[in-house]
Each structure stands twice: as structure tokens, then as C-alpha cells.
Image (cartoon, helix red, strand yellow):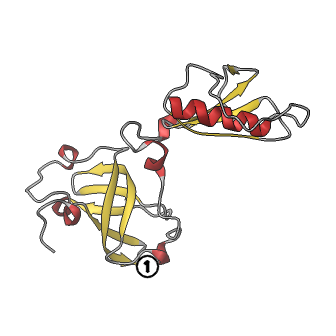
Amino acid sequence: MTRLLALLAATAALLAPASVARTDALRLVRVASGLRSPVYVTGLRSQPGRLYVVEQAGRIVVLQGGRVRAEPFLDIRSLVLSGGEQGLLSVAFDPGVTELAHVKPGMILNGVVTNVAAFGAFVDVGVHQDGLVHVSELANRFVKDPGEVVRVGDRVRVKVLSVDLQRRRIGLSLKALAAGSVG
């Protein structure tokens, strides 16, 4: 929290109107409370006295006049895995993989489980075409019910096994990345 306060103080000093005298000394000043795991602060010179604070859980709040505004600037907490080091990073897809033609066998990609069926799980890897993790590729053990291993909304890392551009199909594996897996 002390690091954030120092960051807030430094940002506030940079955004202060030109008429405010600046000194070389840096001091900590509490500018707000009630923030939840803040990770970044920014502001605009054209809006002195207003700061935007990014919270790890997926919310951007506005500090104005030393108070957190009741309405957040952006709230995507429902789309973000929170806790640990994940936070906003949990919704990141590989920026170099934006269409099916970019997907190649052997790639390791981040994904989100979109559907679970008796034969496996569908995973969005960021290319507008979900890939399939066949039930036999979910784990290094026999899986009777894919719901035992994954649920809709789970964030996963998958290995691309196959890509069929003609049929628009992507074959994926979770077990290829599991500890103790062969191949």
C-alpha cells in the first residue's frame, strides 16, 4: 500500500496545474482509501485533480477531489479471474494469434472454457473459433465426465495438437502440459 501511495503522490505531482509550485522533495500523502489491490495509476494533464486507478480484479475507479467516485470508469470483474498474480492478466490472449490461420500445432495458448460436453471441452483461444479438448486429452488419467476436470469459465493453458483450416477445427490438449505427461 505504501508503494501505491508513493505512486499516487508522484502522479498527482506530475498532474498538478502549472501554477502549483513544485519542489524536488517527494513526500507521501494519502490521497484516497478504499481501493482494492490497486496496480496502476494514471491521469490526464487536461483533467487536473482526477486520477484513474486500475485495480487488479478488473475495475478502474476515478479519484476526483480526493474521493473515489461511486461509479467506476470501467468494471469488467465478471470477466476476470481474481487473486494471486492473475487479475487482469487472466483475460489475455496471445496478441499474435488473432485468426485461425495463425494457430499452429505445438503452440501453447491461453484460453477460456466455453462449453463442456460428454466428449470434451470447447476452449476459446482468441480466434473466433473454439478449439476442442477431447475427453482423452483432458488429463493423464481416465476421465468419465469432463465436468470433473473443467468448468465453463475456467482459464486454461492448452497445447495445439492439430488445425484443420478447411473444416475450421482446432484440436487441443490439457494433458500435454500437465506435470508428468509424456510427449
When asked about the image quadrant of residue 175, the answer is bottom left
Relative to residue 21, is residue 131 depicted above or below? below
Tell which of 167 and 34 is nearer to you.
34
Is 121 on the left or on the right of 7, as rendered? left
Tell which of 176 and 151 is nearer to you.
176
Tell which of 89 and 50 is nearer to you.
50
The total number of labels drawn is: 1
Secondary structure of the residue carrying tag 1 is loop
Q: Residue at x 39, y 59 (%)?
A: 110
Is 113 on the left or on the right of 102, as rendered? left
Kindly identify which residue carries mark 1.
165
Relative to residue 53, is residue 128 depicted above or below? below
| Residue extending furthest toward the left | 142
Residue 111, percent from left and from top? 39, 56
Callout 1 amino acid:
Leu
When asked about the image quadrant of residue 17, the answer is top right
Q: Residue at x 35, y 73 (%)?
A: 107
Is 95 on the left or on the right of 108, as rendered? right
Residue 24, percent from left and from top? 74, 38
| Residue 74 in sight from this viewpoint | no
Q: Residue at x 40, y 44 (%)?
A: 86
Disc 1 crowd rating (10 Å Cα; few below 14, some 14-19, many 20+) is: few
Relative to residue 97, is residue 3 depicted above or below? above
Q: Residue at x 22, y 57 (%)?
A: 119
Point out the image quarter for the C terminus. Answer: bottom left
